[in-house]
Amino acid sequence: MFNKKEKFKFLYTPILSLSPAEMGAIEELADKDRELILPLIPLKGWMASKYLDKGIDRINKALKNKNWIADIDSNYLLHNKEFNLTGVYPRPVFDQIKLLLNPDNGYENWANFIKKMPMVTPTLQIGDVKQVKQQIERLKEIGRGLVVRFPMNDVRALDFNAITKMLIESELNDLLIIYDYEDVNRKNLLESDKYANLLNKMNNALPDAIYSVSCSSFPFSFSGSYRGEIPIYERQIYNKMVDNCPDATLVYSDRGSARANRISGGGGTPPPRIDYPLKNDWRFIRKEFEDAKNTTREERIDLYQKAAQEMMSNDYWLPDLHLWGIQMIERTKLGDEYGITSANRATAVRINLHLYQQLHYDSILDELDTEEDWVD
């Protein structure tokens, strides 16, 4: 999978949440584009489903049974309010996730789970460093490559060094290492030299590995803003890494234009906003309700329609891109009820377009064939 002696065919390894917007966004890409994306998806329960298999089914439906990287969303357990109040999980899926996170015998449950899914590459679980060495051997035996995702804001230096030493000793030649910086801003861009120094040191120790630096700079709030452009700092950071790490093999990763750390929604309906991803920035148009405490479906559809009309009149609009996200904005301009009528659908549109833009970052979009493969 990640053996540098064989050509690594994937151009993009986004970290995607198991959510309706993200699964819908990647599902609506053309098949030829999905072939070049290797998403990392942390496992959790799908919507209100009782069992984990519903989430696996949704991933396979979205990816059309193509390759993906599995991780485990430990925050899914930590942030469960019902368990924190009662000590009991509300559905069996929580207990299934807990079993996968059990470190006993080198995370044996996790390894056995991965074995059953032939299109899946595992992510090393590093919660219990004492069990990592045995886990590496278990996952190595599966023979599908190994992904190590370091949460750079949380991992202790002692643990980072210990895991790195184990990876070196394992003599793995099928390895993807992801430095996950989660949510970032311009300050992180200015510190990217530090990230490059760390990556170069790691590449000296593990020269056969492939590397990613993953993060998200999508804003947490648009309050007070009605239109504008937001720089995609994760892409700028990656470009600097490419320049400063010439001996390393890098693959682009981000959060697909979603935030790394999600904010819990408030009680009201968010103001209608349509985002339009370009290669280096996100353009957006946002409309305000007349009375945010007393909104109607009709007003919401009308405001999304006005946002779409305004967006399509801008010079950055690319009408010849035959993508699902483009079609959705065009439908919204016409007031079509199957266009964008909610924040969740607007998010799916943004992610769909962002995935395409970043996948084809080095291409001239006007020259790409986007006819075909998505299905209405």
Image (spheres, helix red, strand yellow):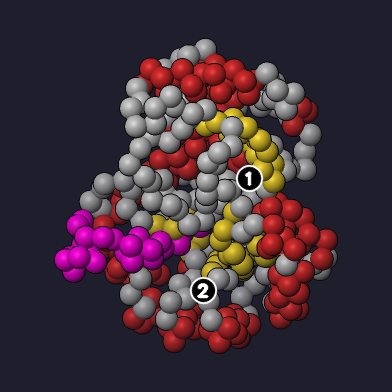
Q: Which residue is mark 2?
A: 154
- Does the magenta portion include 46? no
Residue type at the position of mark 1:
Leu
What's the magenta region?
69-91
**In the structure shown, which secondary structural element does the residue marked by tag 2 occupy?**
loop
- Does the magenta portion include 83? yes
Q: Which one is earlier in the sequence, the residue at label 2 or at label 1? A: 1
Q: Residues within 10 Å of mark 1 (few under 14, many from 20)?
A: some
Going by the image, does 220 lie left or right of 209?
left
Residue 361 x/y as whole percent: 73, 42
Residue 36: numbered disc: 1
Residue 13 x/y as whole percent: 60, 53
**In the structure shown, which secondary structural element does the residue marked by tag 1 occupy?**
loop
Task: Work out whether residue 292 or residue 91 is closer to the camera in this orientation and state it.
Answer: 292
Q: Residue at x 59, y 64 (%)?
A: 181
Task: Work out whether residue 91 or residue 310 is closer to the camera in this orientation and state it.
Answer: 310
The Cα–Cα distance between marks 2 and 1, rounded to whole angstroms, is 30 Å
